[in-house]
Image: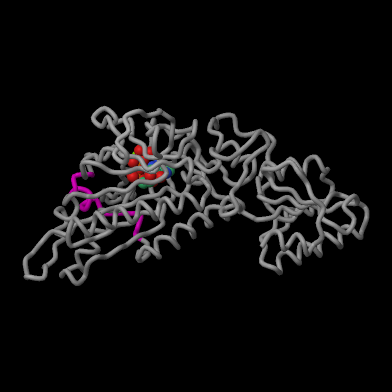
Amino acid sequence: MKQSKLFIKTKREAPKDEEAINARLLIRAGFIDKLMAGVYTFLPLGLRTLKKIENIIREEMNKAGGQEVLMPGLQPKENWVKTGRWDSMDDLYKIKDASGREFALGPTHEEVVFPLLKNVIFSYKDLPLYVYQIQNKFRMELRAKSGLLRGREFLMKDFYSFHTDEKDRDDYYDFMAKVYKNIFDILGIGDKTHYTLASGGTFSKYSHEFQTVTDAGEDTIHICCKCEMAINDDIIKENKSCPKCGESSFSPKKAIEVGNIFKLKEKFADDFGLKFKDKDGMEKTVITGCYGIGLGRLMGAVVESSYDEKGMIWPESIAPFQVHLIRLTTNDKRQTIFADKIYNALQKSGVEVLYDDREDIGAGEKFADADLIGIPWRAVVSERTGNKIEIKKRNEKKTRLVSEKEFIKTLK
Ligand code: ATP
Ligand code: MG
């Protein structure tokens, strides 16, 4: 993509009312635009990164046997009354139409997926079954001041598993924990993201959260001093030793929950009468689990984990482009032709390139933009580089002069 065509320009200053680093950097770099507190538009660069996160998660969910669906955001009040959450859920957006009929804007989808599957699960032969979606959620968050970390409308992957018995569900739960770990590794935050024991709320005794350590975090986790497991602040009081290795000393850290997994008791299955007939013809309640990841929050957490005073530093897996090709302003026509040729050659070999072809912009400004946007490779073509390209990684200082062939080989 040619940067001269990008309809959003970078900004020198972040909005005054935006405190969170992720929002300040993403807005300045033109990844997102703030419509109001907790509600953002994803612009071309930001959407590319969000889509990459989405595709990584989708691929892992498909591999885990998930079947993707897309459920509605607009939901009937009756389903929420049935589970009791019409009154008990503080952050539920309730809306009324002109006739006085009431609806919920989905903050999560148990109220849709359980009635949906009641029509398809009858026998043990229909189980296990795994259903998921990647969709916008709405929550009345009162403190929406952490940029993408806490939105009022935000993209979530929610996955639901249905089983004949607890053993099958528990095995799948442990398997999903590994799938999650792998996703956070691919996104480059694996070493900062801790599998964290948490209280289960009304659904189960315990749940697990995936907590990424960052100063921007709203939670405090207690990381085991021997292994990488952690315990949430709420339950450290009753759990004095590490559930994984037994160690009893912990180190407290601020963290943000990027994902969580829950074993759902019989709560929703009972509310909606989700039952099946086992091998002996006995009627039993379906055993379930649910597994969430916030995609926007994840993107914000990656920014909070990887930036410097100049801007963001994206991991290759979710950078909007792999290469930021910069043509320095010059009146040497040959350089323009050479830079265009590199742009075409990179694209032809499948490399995603943002090409700074802008006229009348100085070298300093182009480099500052490249550092702010944070694409993994910077490649400069100028009078000084002759028929070579000066390349540099965003997180390194050292530059190198290489030929077009060598560069493409380096990228592969
Ligand atoms: P929190 O305690 O941070 O409010 P939660 O327990 O309400 O999170 P869930 O309802 O389990 O979160 O949602 C699943 C995932 O969705 C979370 O792990 C998080 O990644 C993401 N998420 C939840 N609320 C928000 C939000 N307001 N903005 C962005 N992402 C969110
Ligand atoms: Mg919440």
Residue 152 in view, yes or no: no
- Whole-percent x and y of residue 173? 29, 53
**344 with respect to 295 (left or right):** right
**370 with respect to 179 (left or right):** right
The residue nearer to you, when weighing 207 against 110, is 207
- Whole-percent x and y of residue 361? 82, 45
Q: Residue furthest right?
A: 332
Query: Which contiguous range is marked in magenta?
Result: 71-85
Q: How is the image coloured?
A: one colour
Q: Is residue 155 magenta?
A: no
The residue nearer to you, when weighing 98 against 249, is 249
- Whole-percent x and y of residue 296? 48, 47
Residue placed at 11% from the left, 67% from the top?
278
Residue placed at 70% from the left, 48% from the top?
393
From this view, report whether residue 394 is shown above or below residue 141.
Answer: below
Residue placed at 64% from the left, 55% from the top?
321
From this view, report whether residue 364 is shown above or below residue 274.
Answer: above
Q: Report the image quarter containing ligand 1.
A: top left
Q: Is residue 73 magenta?
A: yes
